[in-house]
Image: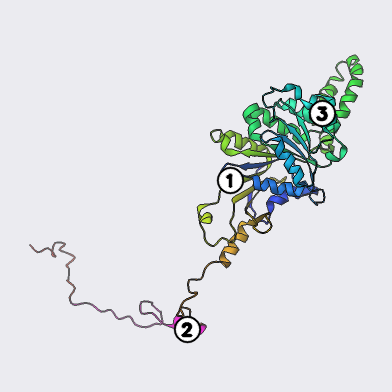
Amino acid sequence: MSSTIVTSIGSNSFTKVFSSSGSDAVGGLILLEDSLESSSQHLLNHLYSLWLPTISKQHRNIWILNFSSTISEYKQLSKKYNNCNFIVIDYYSDSFGWNNNNNIINSNENITENLQQIPMIFKSVKHDSTSIIKDIQNVYNCVPNKFKENPIILINSISTLILKSGLSDTCNLIRSLTNYNFNKVKQDKEKQEKEKEKEQQQEQQDKKKKIEKINKIETGIEGSVSNRIKMEKSFSCIFAILHTDLHEYEQSVQKQLQYISSVSIQVTPLSAKLKYSESLPHPYESTITLITKKRSGRVVRNVEYYYINNVTGKVEFDSAESLQSKQEEQEPDPTQNLSFNLKLTEDEKQARDSVVLPYRHQGNNEQTLLIEDPDDEDFDDEDPDDDLDI
């Protein structure tokens, strides 16, 4: 299917990507690309302020796969929003597996104790895609059902996971999480154990069914198209943070993740024209470019700028169109604050426009008078050397 790129200038498209619901809800991978020069921490804090408060209309259940932050940061985040609860599967505290005895996910006693903590933090040491899916499945089976309502997975950051497990294994993890249904897996495992005895007695006819069930457990994708449409996903979307400067010499990492993503959010520095402009209405931090892939095949590109409001301390956005209009309104007038008047009235403008300038040909059927200067030398075209003084 051929895709067409449409440039759309909207207002606050960044927040709409995460707050949309119904048929317009964005699923799959939402990729947030930043760098050391243009950090996305302000944008991430803005999303936390929308998702974590229970009284917020955009409240979401967050499952964080932590690869690059300390546990204390998440505890402070929970206290900031009135001890709100969310789930953290921590791969950072013991990334090399030196304290493997503290692997809470594989210990039922520790899981029960950890469910009473805020936030709920589960530790693990294995970074391959199969182990991560098993960790999520174990946590999913024991947490209360309220944390399973429209949850979102936040991978912070996917760059660390790529450096440890490789790009191929990370892409397999994203594809699996995008279509994985943990509720189905739990039910299917129980059915599979009961049906194993019957399947052993059957030979060729039941082989196809057995392959479909195994694929259904491993990838979350059922065999037929009709079943695939009806299947409910456990997580609404996968939100991953990519530090592009860590993969500066491996451009295939960024291109591959952009290819499998539904939305790519690129945080880049301001252009020199905007950075040093004196007519900006706000001190903008960075440029946000959102590339959204529609189901129809269209690719919509939105450009926005964000800044921190000095009064409220919140993140606010301006689209490229609104910024241009604000710059035109605030463009300085060089004729202001002068001791004399440089502007013309309407009558003076009409009088100026009605003046016939001498070098303009008016075309009023007037005869043109050609004046020949007698001082000009008369050159003979037949003798090209006539002007030479020999």
Residue at 77% over, 47% down: 81
The residue tagged with tag 3: helix, strand or loop? Answer: helix
Lower sequence index among marks 2 and 3: 3
- Its colouring scheme is rainbow
- Label of residue 138 in the image: 3
Marks 2 and 1 sit apart, C-alpha to C-alpha, by: 52 Å
Local crowd size for mark 2, using a 10 Å CA cut-off: few (<14), some (14–19), many (≥20): few
Q: Is residue 369 left or right of residue 185?
A: left
Q: Nearer the viewer, residue 101 or 181?
A: 101
Measuring from the top left, give residue 50's x and y in whole percent.
75, 49
Q: Residues within 10 Å of mark 1 (few under 14, many from 20)?
A: some
Q: The disc labelled 1 sits on which kind of residue?
A: Ser
Q: Is residue 222 visible?
A: no
Q: Classify residue 364 as left or right of residue 174.
A: left
Which secondary structure lies at badge 1?
loop
Q: Quadrant of residue 188?
A: top right
Q: For the residue marked with disc 3, what is the amino acid?
A: Asn
Q: Are marks 1 and 3 in contact (CB under 8 Å)?
A: no
Above or below, comparing residue 257 to residue 138 in the picture? below
Name the residue located 79 percent from the left edge and 38 percent from the top edge: 119
Q: Nearer the viewer, mark 2 or mark 3?
A: 3
Front position in the image: 162 or 1: 162
Instruction: Tell me which label, 1 or 3, sits earlier in the chain.
Output: 1
- Residue 128 seen by the camera: yes
Which residue is identified by label 2? 348
Badge 2 amino acid: Glu
Tell me where the magenta segment starts and ends, as one range.
Answer: 346-374
Q: Nearer the viewer, mark 2 or mark 1?
A: 1
Q: What numbered label is drawn on residue 38?
A: 1
